[in-house]
Image (cartoon, rainbow, N blue to C red):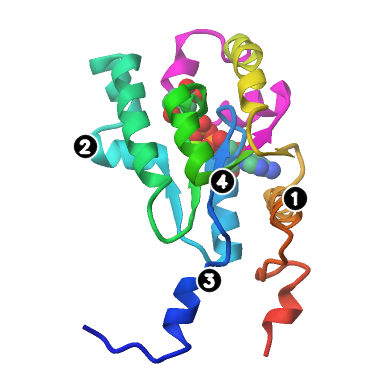
Amino acid sequence: MTAQVPGTRMAEAAQPLLPRTVVLVGLMGAGKSAIGRRLAARLHLPFRDADTEIEAAAGCTIAEIFARDGEPVFRSVERRIITRLVKDEPVHILATGGGAFMDAETRAAIREHGLSVWLRAELDVLVARTARRTHRPILNQGDPRAILGRLMEQRYPVYAEADLEVVSDERPPDVTVELVIDALEAHFGIQLPHRGGRNAKAETP
Ligand SMILES: Nc1ncnc2c1ncn2[C@@H]1O[C@H](COP(=O)(O)OP(=O)(O)OP(=O)(O)O)[C@@H](O)[C@H]1O
Ligand SMILES: O=C(O)C1=C[C@@H](O)[C@@H](O)[C@H](O)C1
Ligand SMILES: [Mg+2]
């Protein structure tokens, strides 16, 4: 076992940068993965993506799980994995899949152990962002705009239960990251040291 120098690593471990894991929720294309990855880098925190973890655990893609086992099996794997991830140490940034927060049990686990942030985007933004790739099985079942519009109606009232809400619009990803950091600082009443942002100067010795 490595010896601990008193007052250094132990003290850091006792005081995480954020009190809780930040869990990004929202529709496909909202930017949970893209913004989550950047946010984690800015805050020097680990980044986890539930969709990626599900694929690693299953040894195949989400599209393959949908095609082979069906959506209910996917949802139960998703529930198990997110319930575990949100409790994982250290505190981290966790991007969920678009449907995850719709599951009552998953939502309860996120509420108990994490801090949820809804990335809210308008239909045009979601359509434009999801059009670039075809790996989302739900959007391959028909007209993506009509599907996303229907999902907005079903899901937005539930996403609205998230602890925080941040708009994700046409502005560059770094702007959205900055908005999330603002929302976290206001919520926790803390100032976060982050590279490239307003507090960057405070980080330089
Ligand atoms: N301002 C922006 N904010 C977020 N993403 C942006 C922005 N501009 C362009 N993009 C692109 O839009 C896409 C957003 O998709 P992303 O995979 O992050 O969404 P998601 O919410 O994780 O969706 P899913 O639920 O399918 O996992 C990415 O390809 C990202 O690079
Ligand atoms: O919104 C959804 O239901 C989904 C979103 C993706 O992140 C994946 O989790 C999957 O394609 C289902
Ligand atoms: Mg994603």
Q: Position of residue 137 (x, y in %)?
A: 41, 20
Q: Position of residue 54 (x, y in %)?
A: 32, 36
Q: Compared to 24, does 174 lie above or below?
A: below
Amino acid at circle 1:
Leu
Q: Secondary structure at mark 2?
A: loop
Please give the residue where the numbered disc 1 appears in the rendered image. Answer: 179
Q: Is 101 positioned to the left or the right of 124 in the image?
A: left
Q: Secondary structure at mark 1?
A: helix
Q: Earlier in the sequence, mark 2 or mark 1?
A: 2
Quarter residue 201 falls in: bottom right
Q: CA distance from mark 4 to mark 1?
A: 14 Å
Residue 15, numbered circle: 3
Q: Foreground: 117 or 148?
A: 117
Q: Is residue 192 visible?
A: yes
Q: Earlier in the sequence, mark 4 or mark 3?
A: 3
Give, as a single range, the part of the protein colored magenta.
118-145
Amino acid at circle 3:
Gln
Q: CA distance from mark 2 to mark 3?
A: 36 Å
Q: Answer whether residue 138 is magenta in the image.
A: yes
Label 1 C-beta lies within 8 Å of the nearest ligand 1 atom = no
Circle 1 residues within 10 Å: few <14, some 14–19, many ≥20: some
Residue 59, numbered circle: 2
Q: Earlier in the sequence, mark 4 or mark 1?
A: 4
Amino acid at circle 2:
Gly
Frontmost of labels 2 and 3 is: 3
Residue at position x 66%, y 19% in the image = 157
Label 4 C-beta lies within 8 Å of the nearest ligand 1 atom = yes
Circle 4 residues within 10 Å: few <14, some 14–19, many ≥20: few
Amino acid at circle 4:
Ala
Please give the residue where the numbered disc 4 appears in the rendered image. Answer: 34
